[in-house]
Amino acid sequence: MFSFSKPKPNTPKKKSKKSLFKRIMAWLHLWLGLASGIIVVIVSLTGCIYVFENEIKDFIEDWRFVKPQKEAFLLPSQLVSIADKKMKDKKATSVTFGAKDEAAIVGYFVEKKEEGEKGRGEKGRGEKRENKRGERKKDLAQNQEKGKSELKPQGKPGEKGKGKGEKRKGGRRSGTFISVYMNPYSGEILNVKTFSRGESPDFFRWILNGHRALWLPYDIGRPIVGVAVLIFVVLLISGIVLWWPTKWIKSIIDKSFKIKWDASFKRVNYDLHNVLGFYSCIFLFFIAVTGLVWSFGWWSKSLYWVTSGGKPLTENRESPKSDTTNVKAFNITTADKVLLNLRKENPQAAGILISIPGKPADPIGAFVYKQKHTFYNMDRYSFDQQTLKEISIKTPFSGKYIEANIPDKIRRMNYDIHVGSVLGLTGKIIAFLASLISASLPITGFIIWWGKQKFGKKKAPAAKPKVASKAIPVPKLKNNAEQEVTA
């Protein structure tokens, strides 16, 4: 008879030693990472490049600098007079002075007219345009406090002031920005730089558009980036939970803090994701948290509420106003007086920006930058264009930095923390490396996940059960004589 061997009993799967909490974190880390990975890569890589925008421009754009002289700078009225001849019918909106070896900048803004607006001439539409122009004196710092700024400060203080005169459309400014770079000693025009959002050939403007909105219209791209960065914050938290060693013994600690370069590709890739993710986590957390201020108004308010110990963010949307009871035609020489007064009070300032009023109610704005390529510790002033009386307005960005309270100082630091400039060049290098690691995390994480899958792998055929046979007795054959007798 044939007999079969007994099949081996199914061995039960080993239960995971991970706690339920860690398993939930692992599930979130995996699927949220797969969902947001490509966006995190784009935002991180563009952020890497944008961190050193100022330094790169200073190196390649030689027309941003002049030979320092012992003579005094020309006054704003003199520079504007020369620049207006070059720009013809356009009116200057700001003048910026930097260090002794830097070019001065006269800023212009050409407002983009709405479709169908040109040539209509209706009174109502004309009033609408006039109201829109009234927003020209809302500078970048004021927009940052609302969490809605689209323009980040540029390399020089003057470029930061280019936002004046912008027209808002759907919460964003629309128009063309022109910067006339001039020799502050002679008034010679060194270069004219023009850009408009979305149509600018400027490389760093293109990088910023990708960083903020993935090169999509801002109303579409900005929320997408915001959600992806919000998910990234969750990934950082869940990543630390998964990284945390189960036991603090030498063998486990080495795996958590060191990359085993001589191991297999899978092990090296895992260490790059695990170890580099841990070392960069704290820096990426601050970069992500500060970046969300420009994506969501509710995040901006909540962050201020946390840092202030429960105080609401002061959102004064009214810009300072000059006294219009005794209106006189604005004299550009008034801006000269403002500049001279600020220079006396701030002899060591790295730069001073003076905004030029466009309407009788607009004040003369002034920004005093204490350090080059740093914006958190600037002092912001508003002066009546007739009397030069200082006009105060309660926002985190108004007044002198040294007189601001702690939560307002933290809010002023938001941009500089985001790009690392709050710690100078060292901070920028840290931000660059952290962003580079951030771009690699979705890639190494995807490789880890892909390596665990069995896509395209042929399953080995099931082994057939072995057949064990018993020996069948064979009858002995009788010899011929016996056969014959039997027969």
Image (cartoon, rainbow, N blue to C red):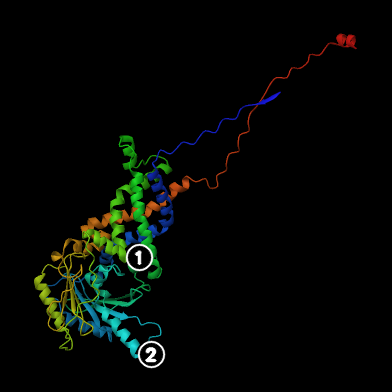
Look at the numbered disc 1 and give the secondary structure of its residue: helix
Kindly indicate whether the residue at mark 1 contacts the one at mark 2 (C-beta within 8 angstroms): no
Q: Nearer the viewer, residue 91 or 223?
A: 223
Residue 304 placed where, x, y %? 24, 62
Residue 202 placed where, x, y %? 34, 70
Q: Vertical placement of 14 versus 376: above or below?
A: above
* Residue found at x 27% / y 71%: 143
* Residue found at x 34% / y 42%: 259
Query: From the viewer's perspective, is 323 left or right of 21?
Result: left
Q: Amino acid at mark 2?
A: Arg
Image quadrant where one finds the N terminus: top right
Residue that numbered label 1 is attached to: 212
Count neighbours of disc 1 (C-alpha within 10 A) and say few if under 14, some if 14 to 19, many if 20 or more.
many
Q: Nearer the viewer, residue 164 or 401?
A: 401
Asked whether residue 215 appears in the rendered view, the answer is no
Q: Vertical placement of 334 versus 37: above or below?
A: below
Q: Which mark is residue 196?
A: none
Image quadrant where one finds the C terminus: top right
* Residue found at x 31% / y 42%: 257
Label count reads 2
Q: Vertical placement of 118 versus 291: above or below?
A: below
Residue that numbered label 2 is attached to: 120
Residue 77 placed where, x, y %? 17, 82
* Residue found at x 13% / y 65%: 403
Q: Nearer the viewer, residue 20 or 467?
A: 20
